[in-house]
Image: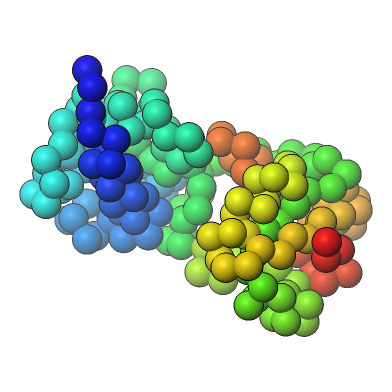
Amino acid sequence: MEYDEKYLNKLSRFMSLILRHRPESIGISLDEHGWANVDELLSGIGEQHPIDMDMLEEIVRADKKQRYSFNEDKTLIRANQGHSIPVDVELDEVSPPEELWHGTGEKYVQDIETEGLLPKSRLYVHLSNDRDTAFKVGQRHGKPVLYIVRSREMYRDGYKFYLSKNGVWLTKAVPVKYLQKQ
């Protein structure tokens, strides 16, 4: 079935807000692992925007960033990462590659050079495997600035890293000494 891509994108952004930050905005709650009941999600979104299960499945399938996951029988759904509310999305600790990348906007450089990378309103700092992805992320925040993160050194020094289902590397913070501005 063909769907209006703009409309599905609008729904996906709304779902991201709900499943990462404000489930109460449509009268639902998430369990401790970030899972929401699919029927409740559809009902809550449906009060503001027409949606059905086929549309929800298409959003999950087509999302380029793979933001969402269903459980096996598709009765539960969650955002894979990016939460500002305390949930445990059951990430396994993973040994990172030698270097990871972080893209940001020029307006944040002074704070980063002083404080390092902090999660701010999120639970984790988000890092990328490659320069191109980090550059795209940085562009969302104005003039892009890139940092190389010496992730393996951090890991050897006791910092934990996690790899989300959609390939985003996560850590609690990156101190300045592990950053190299590009």
Question: Which of 115 and 160 lies nearest the eye of the viewer?
Answer: 115
Residue most extreme to the left: 47
Image spot of residue 172 (x, y percent): 67, 60
Residue 30 seen in render: no
Which corner quadrant holds the C terminus?
A: bottom right
Q: Which residue is drawn at 40% across and 29% down?
A: 62
Say left or right for 11 vs 103.
left
Q: Is residue 37 above or below residue 86?
A: above
Q: Which residue is drawn at 81% across and 56% down?
A: 149
Question: Which of 30 and 80 lies nearest the eye of the viewer?
Answer: 80
Q: Which residue is drawn at 42% across and 34% down?
A: 63
Q: How many numbered marks does the figure carry?
A: 0
Which corner quadrant holds the N terminus?
A: top left
Image spot of residue 48 (x, y percent): 11, 52
Image spot of residue 130 (x, y percent): 74, 43
Q: Which residue is drawn at 78% across and 60% down?
A: 147
Say left or right for 96 vs 47.
right
Image spot of residue 87 (x, y percent): 46, 53
State the image quarter where residue 38 is shown.
top left
State the image quarter where residue 3 is shown.
top left
Residue 50 seen in render: yes
Name the colouring of the figure.
rainbow
Residue most extreme to the top: 1
Say left or right for 136 vs 180.
left
Q: In this view, does 142 lie above or below 30?
A: below
